[in-house]
Each structure stands twice: as structure tokens, then as C-alpha cells.
Image (cartoon, grey):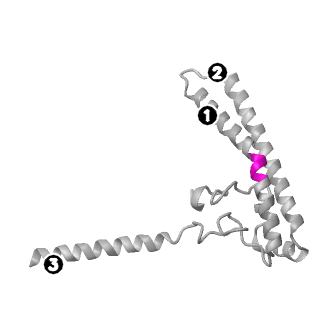
Amino acid sequence: MKKTFIFGLCLALGLALVATVAIAWGPGFGPRFARGFGGPAYGVPPIPGLTTEQSAQIQALRDKFQKQVEPFQKELFTRGTEIRSLWSSTNPDPAAVTAKHKEILDLQSKLQEQATGFGLEIRKVLTPEQLAELPALGSVPAFGPRMGFGPRMGMRGPMGRW
């Protein structure tokens, strides 16, 4: 009887601890709880009064943008792999590492230019009233170079957490 009581008490305390941790963690930044245009998972607040035509135009711009930056992203991944292999050698060549690093910086710069152009194209779709509300939402930088390249991949990494 005493063992059963102690076991039940430990089980209840364990469940309470798990529930407390789950509640403290919160709902997270997944697709249902995150913010974004064209869907909640893109990391920016929704644009007020967005019509279906505007949403379709923004989605078309986003698709075009993703097609434009895909080669840069693949090349950036390749260069990142190459620089990691250079650094992992026992005696890395400083000139090769520096040259590879400059290549990576150039690719990142090109990606930033593409993202800036994408943000400017989105702003052309919006009405003056919608543009006036963007600074109040704090989303102006999200339509520029700092925008992430996919769901939940904004400035703070996957799921909005470090």
C-alpha cells in the first residue's frame, strides 16, 4: 500500500513537471502560430487588407525570387563545403581560405541584392494605405535584405529560436 502511494505520488509529480515545462515552452513558431504574408510561416506580420489579387501577385513574385536565388544558394552551399574542407586540413593554405571566403562574401552580396529587389517589387504591389501601416507593424526590414528564404528561416533560425 505504501509503495503504491509513493509510486502514484512520484508519477503525479512527474506529470506536473512535464506539463509545466510544456506550458513554459509555449506553442512555438510553427506554421499555425508564426506570422507571415501569404501564409503564417514566413516570419513577417500579415499585410492588412491584402486582396486575393495582391496575394497572388506576391506569391508569383516570391516564386520568381526563389527561382532566381536558387543557383546562388546552391553555389553558396558548395563554397561553404569547400571552405570547411580547407579549414579542416592539418595545415590550411591562407591564400586559398581567403580566396574562398571572398567568393562566399560575393555570393552573399548577390543574394542580398536579389532580396532587396524582391522587397521593392512587393512594395509596388501594395496600396499607399498598406504601405503606411507597414512601419507600425515593424515589418519594413522584412521586405528587404534581411528576409529569410523559406518557412521559419528568418533572422533567428529554424522555428524562430537560436
Residue 154 image point, x, y percent: 67, 58
Residue 12 image point, x, y percent: 27, 76
**Taking 31 as reference, is 96 left or right?**
right
**Taking 29 as reference, is 148 left or right?**
right
Q: How crowded is mark 1: few (under 14 residues within 10 Å), some or many (20 or more)?
A: few
> Is 17 a magenta residue?
no
Q: How far apart are marks 2 and 3 (CA)?
A: 67 Å
Q: What stretch is highlighted in magenta?
A: 65-69
Residue 80 image point, x, y percent: 64, 36
Q: Name the quadrant containing residue 55.
A: bottom right
Q: Distance between the residues labelled 3 and 1?
A: 57 Å
Pick whichever, 43 or 54, lies toward us: 54
Residue 81 circle label: 1
Q: Do the residues labelled 3 and 1 touch (CB within 8 Å)?
A: no
Q: Name the quadrant containing residue 155.
A: bottom right
Residue at numbered disc 2: 93
Instruction: Give the quarter of the figure containing the C terminus.
Output: bottom right
Residue 5 circle label: 3
| Residue at 64%, 56% in the rendered image | 153
**Which element type, helix, strand or loop, lies under badge 1?**
helix
Q: Earlier in the sequence, mark 1 or mark 2?
A: 1
**Which element type, helix, strand or loop, lies under badge 2?**
loop
Q: How crowded is mark 2: few (under 14 residues within 10 Å), some or many (20 or more)?
A: few
